[in-house]
């Protein structure tokens, strides 16, 4: 937990001709904020980092993240030197803009505010590997390499 951005950066440097998409959790990123400065310094053009900001450690039981209403990931990313940083709290707007962002040079940082329905937990816990495979298969058509860390 907490190393998705670092592993994703390594993949982007190892495979510069392939777009790398990192799906990360807010708790995971908070455990490794220094990676944002490292990403900025490396300046990988093929790197997109999406953070699901729900304010909880979702897959371990939805324990609240300390300070969840005090941080702003977009501001932190910009302050770390990632100029192309975005924050979305509307899924429709994000969906409309995401395809455009996929065609931009990175690094790109996206904070996506989300909320979970109680019943969603049953669909993910214990099945993350299978859901990751489905997402990977879907994204392979766009020639994206995906690294997921939902904690």
Image (cartoon, rainbow, N blue to C red):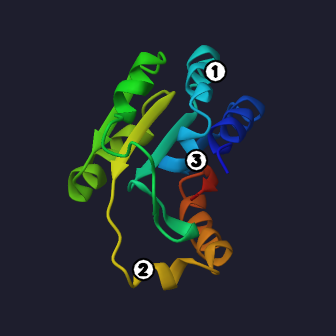
Q: Mark 3 near mark 1, Cβ–Cβ under 8 Å?
A: no
Quickly name the residue at label 1: 38
Left or right for 8, reference 78? right
Q: Residues within 10 Å of mark 3 (few under 14, many from 20)?
A: many
Q: Residue at x 67, y 33 (%)?
A: 9
Across and down, in percent, residue 41 comes to: 61, 14
- Residue nearest the viewer, comparing 111 with 20: 111
Q: Residues within 10 Å of mark 1 (few under 14, many from 20)?
A: some
CA separation, marks 3 and 1? 16 Å
Quickly name the residue at label 3: 28
CA separation, marks 2 and 1? 34 Å
Across and down, in percent, residue 75 comes to: 35, 25
Question: Picture quarter containing residue 74?
Answer: top left
Compared with 75, 144 (above or below) is below
Across and down, in percent, residue 92 comes to: 22, 58
Quickly name the residue at label 2: 120
- Precedes in sequence: disc 2 or disc 1: 1
Compared with 38, 90 (above or below) is below
Q: Residue at x 62, y 39 (%)?
A: 5
Residue at the extreme right of the image, as rendered: 14
């Amino acid at each position: 937990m907490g190393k998705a951005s670092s592993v994703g950066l390594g993949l982007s440097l190892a495979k510069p001709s392939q777009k790398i998409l990192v799906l990360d959790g807010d708790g995971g990123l908070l455990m490794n904020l220094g990676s944002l400065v490292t990403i900025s310094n490396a300046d990988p053009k093929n790197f997109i980092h999406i953070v699901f900001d729900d304010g909880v450690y979702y897959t371990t039981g939805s324990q609240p993240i300390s300070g969840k209403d005090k941080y702003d990931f977009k501001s932190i990313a910009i302050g770390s030197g990632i100029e192309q940083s975005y924050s979305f709290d509307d899924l429709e707007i994000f969906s409309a803009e995401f395809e455009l962002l996929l065609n931009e040079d990175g690094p790109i940082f996206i904070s996506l505010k989300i909320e979970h329905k109680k019943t969603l937990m049953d669909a993910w816990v214990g099945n993350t590997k299978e859901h990751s495979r489905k997402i990977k298969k879907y994204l392979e058509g766009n020639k994206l390499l995906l690294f997921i860390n939902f904690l």
